[in-house]
Amino acid sequence: MTTLTAPAAPSDRARRAVRRRPAFAQLLRTELRLFIREPVALFWGVAFPVVLLVVLGIATSSKPQHSLGNVKFIVAYTPVVMVFSLTILALNALPPALAAHREKGYLRRLSTTPVGAWRLLTVEVAINFAASVVVVVLIAAIARIAFSVPLPSELGGFVLAIVLGAAAMLGLGTLVSALAPSARIAGIVGSLLFFPMMFFAGLWVPRAEMGSALRGISDYTPLGALVAAVQRTTGGNWPGTMHLAVLAAWAVIMCVAAGRLFRWES
Amino acid sequence: MTETIEQRTVDTVVSVQDLRVRYGATVAVDGISLSIRRGEIFGILGPNGAGKTTTVECIGGLRTPDEGTISVLGLDARRDRDELRERVGIQLQSSELPDKLGVGEALELFAAFYDDPADPDELMRLLGLTEKRETRFAKLSGGQKQRLSIALALIGRPQVAILDELTTGLDPQARRETWKLIESVRDSGVTVLLVTHFMEEAERLCDRIALLHHGRIHAIDTPAGLASGVQASQQVSFVPSAPLDGESLRSLHGVGDVSHQGERVTVTGTGDLVGILMTELARRHVVPMQTRVHQSSLDDAFVAMTNDEEQR
């Protein structure tokens, strides 16, 4: 029992400090394990978009489509698939995970330790962001190698658009988990938001084929603006200022609202 | 360096003055003051809704009181919250871990939060969790979850451990083992603040107890002191070997009441009731048969307290 409480000798303490992992790194490591143990999120957020890309690439015509602005179907769709995976992670994986942590009292439990619950929130969002980046890179690579989809040659604009888009969506996901009373409801709300948002991203009707009124609405939605911005970068152009501004506005609104409204206790 | 700090605060580890907490119109804690000494197991006992959990949440820095001051290890519960978290271990009522987090992983994670943690392997051994190292939280039994929760409260080598409803949901065997563990934690120098509504637990474990009711402290004393404070604290009943004039026993010192139920005579009173009664019966050549003695317990103190309050 003495080992529990007897003050450690200085050398012992120093040795411990060297051997031990910093709190944040250990939290990241643990949450990463938990993320990987959630097969549903991994399947829909990572595996499914990759399969979707391959199926679309194989099944669709390799000739430029006039209605899509004289690009191949898969070229127009690659940004949509990227946005698809990012959205799944932000709206379907993150909210129930965060809400479950709160529902179980885990956030409250952490707030009794020197680490505090806000670090867990940061780690959760960071993991989902990192997963989004990995999938986006994976999709860009597969699209390039298998279907000759040009890589975004305006790399700076591409990265900026993806970061702003991810911030807006992860902010929205955190907001959903803040407002939902339980993990189950957070999951349902995330799914309900997914369909209209992905509609405006052009998952069912490509943006190029939308009527001007519909595309006008799409321009002001986070995912519509994100797809438009990413499509521009594939052609070597800097994303439109309006689309970047829309993304930045959504990112600020969502993150501020999530930060204000997040509750640590149910 | 730590020695001198500890010496300065020798006796009182937790000091609470005029604590008040309201939830909207409800007053959960209504002016509680108490002080807890180093190295004791201090119990907070009371019926549901008495304000026990709210009180310890304030002490643990989890809740901000509306009024009152709280000092823990010489630190202000609100201002020095960070320092407090390092030195106070808290086991919360109904707080769970992620389903897919393993026992060993949880302990290693929490160990990383503190400057000078206990060894996770050692704690697992002490709490009988070594074989469950790889088991995920969702697969643990209620008792195992509870033991893990205690282990997590102790992983930072706290100077004060706050344990809320420690043994709720444990079977009697596990409960007794947990009590032994808490005693050994206390013996290693940790001050333990225990919230409970189990009389037996409070009686067995606590050095001192605060009885809480409707957000107020009804009494603070040792378990024996609380029990003896109850009126008519002893009861002796017996069947006399020869006819006995029960009423004549009333004049004896300490006897409060005498009642008959068939042949059985029941005498209630205070002081050295048994000795006085036996001497008197011997003098009258009466042998008490089938004698039963009932000492009032913490249970009686508790019931007396709640009755008192209801009558107000």
Image (cartoon, helix red, strand yellow):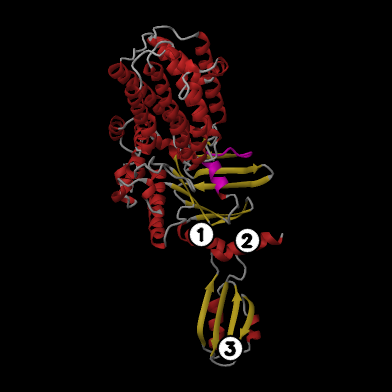
Residue B250 can be seen in this image: yes
| Residues rendered magenta in the picture | B53-68
Residue B263 circle label? 3
- Circle 1 Cα neighbour tier, 10 Å, few/some/many (<14 / 14–19 / ≥20): some
Foreground residue among A192 and B51? A192
Please name the residue shown 35% across and 32% down the image.
A32
Distance from the alpha carbon under mark 2 to that under mark 1: 15 Å
Measure the alpha-carbon separation of dots 3 and 1. Answer: 36 Å
Quadrant of the image containing the N terminus of chain B: top left
Q: Position of residue A177 (x, y in %)?
A: 51, 34
Proximity of marks 2 and 1: CB atoms separated by less than 8 Å: no
- Number of marks in picture: 3
Q: Which of these two is toward me, B277 or B219?
A: B219
Instruction: Please state the chain letter of the residue tagged with numbered disc 1 in the rendered image.
Output: B
Q: Secondary structure at mark 1?
A: loop
Query: Label 3 near label 2: C-beta < 8 Å?
Result: no
Nearest to the observer: residue A62 or residue A184:
A62
The residue under label 2 is which amino acid type?
Met
Marks 3/1 same chain: yes
> x and y percent of residue A181 in the render?
55, 39
Q: Residue furthest top?
A: A237
- Residue at image point 28% right, 19% down: A146
Q: Residues within 10 Å of mark 3 (few under 14, many from 20)?
A: few
Q: Which residue is labeled 2 in the image? A: B305
